[in-house]
Image: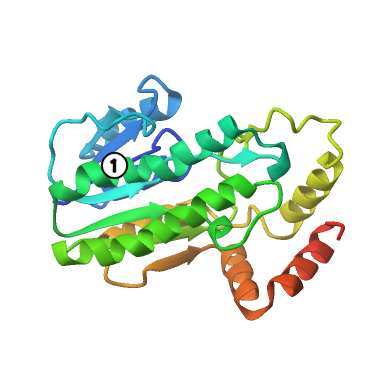
Amino acid sequence: MRTVLVTGCGSGFGLLTALTLARRGDRVLATVRDPRSEGAERLRRSAADEGLPLEVRRLDVTEPFAGAPVELDALVNNAGYILRGPVVTLSDEELRAQFEVNVLGPVRLIRALAPRMRPGGVIVNVSSIAGSVGVPFEGAYSAAKAALESLSAALRFELAPYGLHVVVIAPGNYGTSIRARARWAEAFTEDHRDRAAHDRFWSAFDRSLAGRGDPQEVADAVAAAVEAPEAAYHRLVGKDAEFLYDLHRRTSQEDFERLVGETLGLER
């Protein structure tokens, strides 16, 4: 039985991933920031009703890791959030908070737990297509995911001598609560000059690409990475992620901007 620690299990991909791994027979340490949340309670009920090897534990990735020593076979860095607003509206504090959760959080856990992982173990970092393609009005989120992917590439070199694998899962836009729970830049008010462009872009995006996949696909991709980490390093999940990644690779940045702008209503 593998032991897997998953962060951000209170909702969305993390919750589904924790249940998926436990149902496949892994011992899952499902971590949440608030153990009294609805998601944490759902995990406990499922564990009790189905007899799953799943424990709910409190973990805030912005705090130093202070958990009890445990030997892990896999670490899934999933916790994160989206900061929404044009880059020029973002305060230093808002930018720091975005990187604190989405970049420094995974680094803290890797630093604390990688030395305790068994050879053959895997670190799965949940990124986003935003890490490869700069998403308008989510520049900080895109930058944080790009940083996570670069760190993951470096970690593959550094941890390979210890028998550890690193895999990146990059989903597209799924119908989870992460967008509903996005934090808005304080300066990006309803009367901001870019608010209409933001609304046109996301309305067109929702109509064209988003919400067509089942979030379970991402949980299954994470579980597959835990089971077979020696396969592909960077794994796209979702038709929109595959389409945008391929388009970006095949075209210049200028042409990519033009095509996306024309399709999704961004003025140039």
- Determine if residue 47 is in view: yes
Q: Which of the 4 quarters of the picture holds residue 94?
A: top right
The spot of residue 71 in percent (x, y) is: 12, 45
The residue at 63%/67% (across/down) is: 244
Image quarter (top left, top right, bottom left or bottom right) of the C terminus: bottom right
Would residue 170 be found to the left or right of residue 69 on screen?
right
Q: Which residue extends farthest top? A: 36
Q: Which residue extends farthest bottom? A: 250
Q: Nearer the viewer, residue 223 or 191?
A: 191
The residue at 37%/34% (across/down) is: 61
- Determine if residue 6 is in view: no
The spot of residue 194 in percent (x, y) is: 83, 42
The residue labelled by disc 1 is 109
The spot of residue 60 in percent (x, y) is: 36, 29
Would residue 250 be found to the left or right of residue 198 on screen?
left
Q: Which of the 4 quarters of the picture holds residue 188?
A: top right
Would residue 89 be found to the left or right of residue 173 on screen?
right
19 is higher (above) or lower (below) than 68: below
| Amino acid marked by disc 1 | Leu
Q: Which of the 4 quarters of the picture holds residue 241?
A: bottom right
The residue at 72%/42% (across/down) is: 88
Mark 1 burial class by Cα count in 10 Å: few <14, some 14-19, many 20+: many
The spot of residue 22 in percent (x, y) is: 26, 45
40 is higher (above) or lower (below) than 7: above
